[in-house]
Amino acid sequence: RSKSANLKQQITAYVPDRLLVFRNLPSSVGPPGFSVYPQLAIVMELRALPGADTEVVLSHVGYQQGKDFDALYGFFKRHNPEYLADLKAFAERTVKGP
């Protein structure tokens, strides 16, 4: 079980089929730099593409200068591709069935 598995999030904005914005709540565990993680907003945009495909754009907003923000940025730069691949696999499995 990863250290980030216990993160709790609060949805701050939602537009069905288009946008999800959330923040992570303060936690005693998480990725490197987790102490500043609640200061970021995570924006997930969904863009319809031809052929019933969807493009997902994931942005983290609110980074500042400092070692904790640098560590957090590095963590997500390394791990977001895996997160997005897992999200894609989940969505395809959900659409196509078990």
Image (cartoon, rainbow, N blue to C red):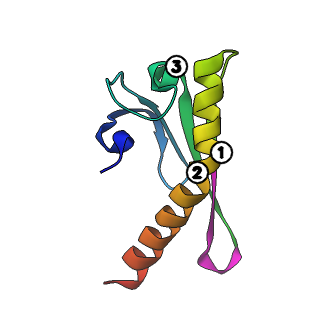
Residue 50, picture quadrant: bottom right
Horizontally, is 12 left or right of 75 in the view? left
Q: Residue under circle 3?
A: 39
Name the amino acid, label 2. Asn
Q: Nearer the viewer, mark 3 or mark 1?
A: 1
| Numbered range of the magenta stretch | 50-57
Tag 3 near tag 2, CB within 8 Å:
no
Secondary structure beneath disc 2?
A: helix
In the rendered image, residue 68, in percent from the top left (x then y), is placed at 58, 21
- The residue labelled by disc 2 is 80
Rate crowding at label 3 as few (under 14), some (14 to 19) or many (20 or more) other CA atoms within 10 Å. some
Relative to residue 49, is residue 83 depicted above or below? above
Measured Cα–Cα span from mark 3 to mark 1: 17 Å
Picture quadrant of residue 72: top right
- Which three-letter amino acid code belongs to the residue tagged 1? Lys
Circle 1 SS class: helix
| Residue at 54%, 29% in the rendered image | 41
Q: In this picture, is 84 found above or below 62?
A: below
Q: Is residue 71 magenta?
A: no
In this view, the residue in front, 72 or 50, is 72
